[in-house]
């Protein structure tokens, strides 16, 4: 007898439909799984066999063949346990075939028959919805995540016995209802670090405000203790809130990577990733035999903070160039080519020399060769992809003694959100959200300059020996400065402000 069960698998961060075909026939008892299964899928045989037996059902002593179609695509993970078990029970006529006709099944089985949660539920359920399947049976812990797919009726189960009773209509399971009030509740902003605790560095705070409003990359250069890391960790507190579409996109990535904490359904805060400088290139970009998202994808729609930038491996830094430019990373393997989103803001921090005190009086004892070797770890092409470069002097005693503090994150965020709303309205038909995402044709349309502004930029282009990319980045950052100023046109003052954040690549990186 043959049974066909609807299931799903992952390809990158997207799901695709898989038919689990189960056949019971006469012959020597055996249990074979075909269709390019990996080790975890092959081990389903023992989990399914024992789970069925421990659920009070006699396992059939027949020849069992399971095919995972399409058979030419590699399958991985334990999410096929539940559909395989349901297919066997359908072939045994314990579960009626019609009950499985338009239902998606996903879940891992324990040996006692209980159903365990799996990674990647959101993209798999979403792909099933696109295939026209409107009902799904998932592990109880994955119900909230699956219910994010609008229009999908989610039936959570805790064990195999409960599944059988539901499919045979002996017991009814109420579809899971998503708590919208909880879903869209305010984030815990009181847990975020606040800019008011940072003494001095007002120029740097302004540059970070500009970066937050327009989605620009930032490099901070300064001596140890000047507040580089302190400011970077407070940067998320002034970022615009995520839209629902951005939250869904980030949640898909974290679901595939298995990083959803406590199986919470929706990520509502922009990611802030801060990998150690010993990270490998593949961990930063993504990879593995079957590629998984790396740090640049986990920081999608958020922030990637690289502290002590020159200490990172040169190869790791260089592979970031393409994701920073394109907003996505493509990884090719023998098994196929996968593309992960990686539209992130880079916040980097570094010392000006190995000892860190270059430019701070007579403290620096580094030789010119040591300074050149240290600074040359950051290549010109990578530096060219950074919009704003800020010099941070050491904090003075007077600043530390100042008890009043600066502006709060909430006050800065108000201006950032107002500028972001201007951008959302301007680009509502362009498919972008920040000025930093403008392409060449869009820059010509939205970053028009007057005669005075053009003359200033022409002089700067010649004196600073800019590349075409640097020229475009200045225009995009100037557009953000104008938005923060609620100005329709880019003025001389906006270009002048941005130019001061581009001079450090000539001062230090020679």
Image (cartoon, rainbow, N blue to C red):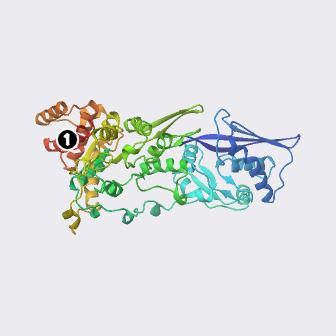
Relative side of 9 to 197, left or right: right
Relative side of 151 to 44, left or right: left
- Whether residue 474 is visible: yes
x then y, percent, for residue 293: 51, 43
Foreground of the two, 88 or 42: 42
Q: Which residue is mark 1?
A: 499
Q: Residue at x 55, y 47 (%)?
A: 256
Q: Quadrant of residue 450?
A: top left
| Residue furthest left in the image | 452
x then y, percent, for residue 79: 65, 48
Image quadrant where one finds the N terminus: top right
Disc tally is 1
Foreground of the two, 162 or 159: 159
Question: Relative to residue 39, is residue 118 depicted above or below?
Answer: below
Image quadrant where one finds the C terminus: top left
Question: Relative to residue 402, is residue 456 depicted above or below?
Answer: above
Foreground of the two, 50 or 107: 50
x then y, percent, for residue 495: 18, 41
- How many other residues sit within 10 Å of disc 1, few (<14), some (14-19) or many (≥20)? many
């Amino acid at each position: 007898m043959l049974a066909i069960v609807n299931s799903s698998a992952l390809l990158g961060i997207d799901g695709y439909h898989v038919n689990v075909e189960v056949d019971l026939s006469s012959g020597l008892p055996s249990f074979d799984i075909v269709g390019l299964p990996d080790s975890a899928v092959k081990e389903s045989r023992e989990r399914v066999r024992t789970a069925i037996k421990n659920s009070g059902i006699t396992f059939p002593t027949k020849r069992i063949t399971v095919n995972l179609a399409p058979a030419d695509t590699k399958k991985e993970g334990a999410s096929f346990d539940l559909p395989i078990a349901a297919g066997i029970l359908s072939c045994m006529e314990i579960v009626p075939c019609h009950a499985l006709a338009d239902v998606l099944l996903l879940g891992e089985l324990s040996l006692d028959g209980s159903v365990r949660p799996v990674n990647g539920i959101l993209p798999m359920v979403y792909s099933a919805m696109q295939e026209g399947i409107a009902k799904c049976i998932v592990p109880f812990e994955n119900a909230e995540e699956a219910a994010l797919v609008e229009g999908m009726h989610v039936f959570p189960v805790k064990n195999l016995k409960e599944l059988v009773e539901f499919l045979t209509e002996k017991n009814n399971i109420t579809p899971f209802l998503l708590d919208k009030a909880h879903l869209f509740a305010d984030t815990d902003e009181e847990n975020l670090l606040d800019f008011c605790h940072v003494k001095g560095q007002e120029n740097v705070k302004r540059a970070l405000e500009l970066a937050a409003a327009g989605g620009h990359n930032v490099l901070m250069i300064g001596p140890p203790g000047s507040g580089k890391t302190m400011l970077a960790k407070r940067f998320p507190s002034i970022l615009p809130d995520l839209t629902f579409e951005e939250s869904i996109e980030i949640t898909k990535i974290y679901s595939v990577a298995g990083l959803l904490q406590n199986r919470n359904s929706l990520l509502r805060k922009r990611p802030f990733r801060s990998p150690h400088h010993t990270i490998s290139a593949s961990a930063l970009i993504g990879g593995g035999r079957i590629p998984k998202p790396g740090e640049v994808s986990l920081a999608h729609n958020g922030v990637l903070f690289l502290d002590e930038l020159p200490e990172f491996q040169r190869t790791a830094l260089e592979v970031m160039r393409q994701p920073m430019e394109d907003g996505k990373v493509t990884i090719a393997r023998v098994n196929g080519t996968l593309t992960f989103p990686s539209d992130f803001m880079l916040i980097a921090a570094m010392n000006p020399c190995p000892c860190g005190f270059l430019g701070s009086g007579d403290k620096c004892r580094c030789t010119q060769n040591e300074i050149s070797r240290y600074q040359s770890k950051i290549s010109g092409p990578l530096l060219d992809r950074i919009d704003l470069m800020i010099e941070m002097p050491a904090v003075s005693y007077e600043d530390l003694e100042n008890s009043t503090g600066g502006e709060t994150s909430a006050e800065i965020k108000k201006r950032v959100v107002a500028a972001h709303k201007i951008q959302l309205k301007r680009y509502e038909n362009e498919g972008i959200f920040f000025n930093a995402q403008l392409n060449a044709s869009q820059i010509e349309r939205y970053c028009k300059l007057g005669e005075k502004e053009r003359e200033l930029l022409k002089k700067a282009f010649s004196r600073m020996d800019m590349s075409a990319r640097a020229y475009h980045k200045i225009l995009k950052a100037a557009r953000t400065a104008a938005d923060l100023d609620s100005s329709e046109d880019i003025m001389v003052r906006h270009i002048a402000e941005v130019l001061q954040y581009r001079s450090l690549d000539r001062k230090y990186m020679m």
